[in-house]
């Protein structure tokens, strides 16, 4: 039987996103493979989303990511307005077999608040589960609303109420993993790269300090707050420091950025990003938080770039120490491990990516979860 799934990507960025956009990139990777498996997809996003789908619904014409710079009392209605449109669409039709929701906190709360007559829901948890203890510690979605994690480590840290609604985890994937083992390797440069939004949890300050101390070259690729290019941040002036990520960058990272040993290149997208990552000796993840999903980690493996990282969150699930990367619980040891990364075989990294992290693998895992959630919802009616 063909499933019709409402894929709720949220109002913040188009799908696929123009550059950085973790959740939106996951949705853009997942949907084409679901459609190959016969799933009909209704995308709830913004009007400018260009991802081919069977149907699209929206409230906002374009992504609202810029609004996140505003105070909470001025921005808190954005997600609610989007969810209001989603709920109206669900009330107006009866062909949605399941909602696959990706909107942090308010998506889960809204879907649960629809009550027993709402459709089955699978809510994917993409973030740190310690962020919303009041919601996650008191969740009651019955048999209709279920959650999945993006790693076992993430779910292990979840409050009990959230764990009771869990149907397991699905590791993230990347299109780069497709036929990764058939692509020829590229010549490695003399630098390491750290990918991701620059903030305290990602630990770019630690990576930059170690680079200066140990003498390895490091490229920092990712936005600082809403600023995707160094020139944009420079032009923003002192007002930009109202953003906590901007303050972190100026106070903790920028003192190490000299344009030679440590460079910040801003957001790098598309082929430029892939070339930067593929040409690196290793990808450095000096994490100071429990990384839940690790999209950039699986992209690194797919491009034949070993990972050097602190052993936190999902990293031990994704990386085999000594084969596809080097992990340590000691931050100060990262500098030594960087020097050993050249001993790892890029081909092993690519083979691991093909086996575990292709979009087809992720899509099949989600289809299995869709059927599981629908079975649990059906059980409610059987027991009533």
Image (tube, rainbow, N blue to C red):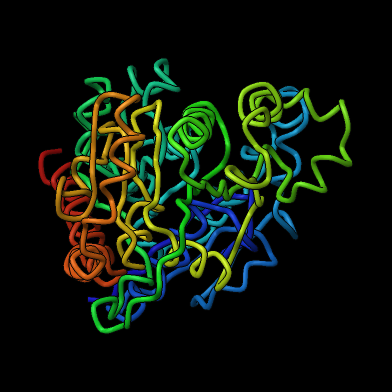
Q: Is residue 363 visible?
A: yes
Determine the image quadrant of residue 269. bottom right
Query: Which quadrant holds the N terminus?
Result: bottom left
Q: Is residue 62 left or right of residue 101?
A: right
Query: Which quadrant holds the C terminus?
Result: top left
The single residue placed furthest to the left in the displayed view is 383
- In this view of the protein, which residue sits in the foreground, 194 or 315? 194
**108 to 1, vertically: above or below:** above
Determine the image quadrant of residue 179. bottom left
Give the total of numbered labels: 0
Q: Is residue 367 visible?
A: no
Q: Is residue 25 left or right of residue 145?
A: right
**153 to 382, vertically: above or below:** above
Q: What residue is shown at x 62% (from left), y 40% (from top)?
A: 79
Q: Position of residue 94 (x, y in %)?
A: 42, 62
Q: What residue is shown at x 48% (from left), y 37% (from top)?
A: 211
Q: What residue is shown at x 19% (from left), y 39% (from top)?
A: 152
Q: Position of residue 60 (x, y in %)?
A: 72, 54
Q: Is residue 255 left or right of residue 15?
A: right
- In this view of the protein, which residue sits in the foreground, 44 or 18? 18
Q: Position of residue 117 (x, y in %)?
A: 36, 44
- In this view of the protein, which residue sits in the foreground, 354 or 88? 354
Q: What residue is shown at x 41% (from left), y 36% (from top)?
A: 127
Q: Position of residue 287 (x, y in %)?
A: 39, 32
């Amino acid at each position: 039987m063909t499933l019709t799934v409402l894929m709720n990507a949220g109002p913040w960025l188009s799908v696929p996103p123009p550059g950085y956009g973790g959740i939106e990139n996951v949705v853009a990777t997942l949907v084409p493979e679901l459609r190959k498996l016969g799933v009909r997809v209704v995308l709830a996003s913004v009007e400018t989303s260009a991802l081919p789908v069977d149907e699209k619904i929206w409230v906002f014409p374009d992504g609202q990511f810029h609004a996140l710079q505003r105070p909470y009392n001025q921005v808190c209605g954005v997600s609610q307005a989007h969810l209001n449109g989603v709920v109206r669409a669900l009330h107006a039709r009866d062909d949605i077999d399941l909602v696959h929701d990706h909107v942090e906190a308010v998506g889960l709360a809204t879907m649960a608040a629809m009550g027993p007559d709402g459709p089955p829901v699978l809510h994917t948890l993409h973030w740190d589960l310690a962020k919303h203890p009041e919601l996650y510690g008191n969740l009651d979605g019955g048999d209709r609303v279920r959650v999945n994690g993006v790693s076992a480590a993430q779910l292990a840290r979840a409050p009990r109420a959230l764990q009771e609604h869990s149907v397991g985890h699905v590791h993230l994937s990347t299109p780069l993993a497709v036929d990764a083992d058939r692509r020829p390797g590229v010549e490695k440069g003399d630098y390491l790269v750290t990918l991701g939004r620059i903030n305290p949890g990602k630990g770019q300050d630690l990576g930059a300090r170690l680079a200066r101390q140990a003498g390895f070259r490091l490229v920092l690729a990712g936005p600082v707050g809403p600023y995707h290019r160094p020139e944009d941040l420079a032009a923003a002036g002192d007002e930009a420091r109202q953003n906590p990520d901007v303050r972190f960058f100026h106070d903790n990272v920028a003192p190490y950025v000299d344009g030679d040993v440590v460079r910040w290149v801003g957001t790098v997208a598309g082929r430029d990003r892939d070339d930067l990552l593929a040409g690196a000796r290793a990808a450095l993840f000096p994490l100071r938080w429990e990384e839940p999903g690790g999209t950039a980690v699986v992209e690194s493996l797919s491009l034949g770039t070993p990972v050097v990282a602190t052993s936190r969150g999902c990293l031990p699930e994704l990386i085999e120490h000594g084969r596809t990367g080097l992990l340590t619980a000691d931050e100060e040891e990262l500098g030594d491990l960087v020097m050993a990364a050249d001993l790892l075989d890029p081909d092993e990294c690519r083979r691991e990516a093909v086996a575990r992290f292709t979009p087809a693998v992720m899509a099949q895992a989600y289809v299995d979860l869709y059927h599981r959630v629908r079975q649990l919802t059906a059980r409610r009616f059987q027991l009533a």
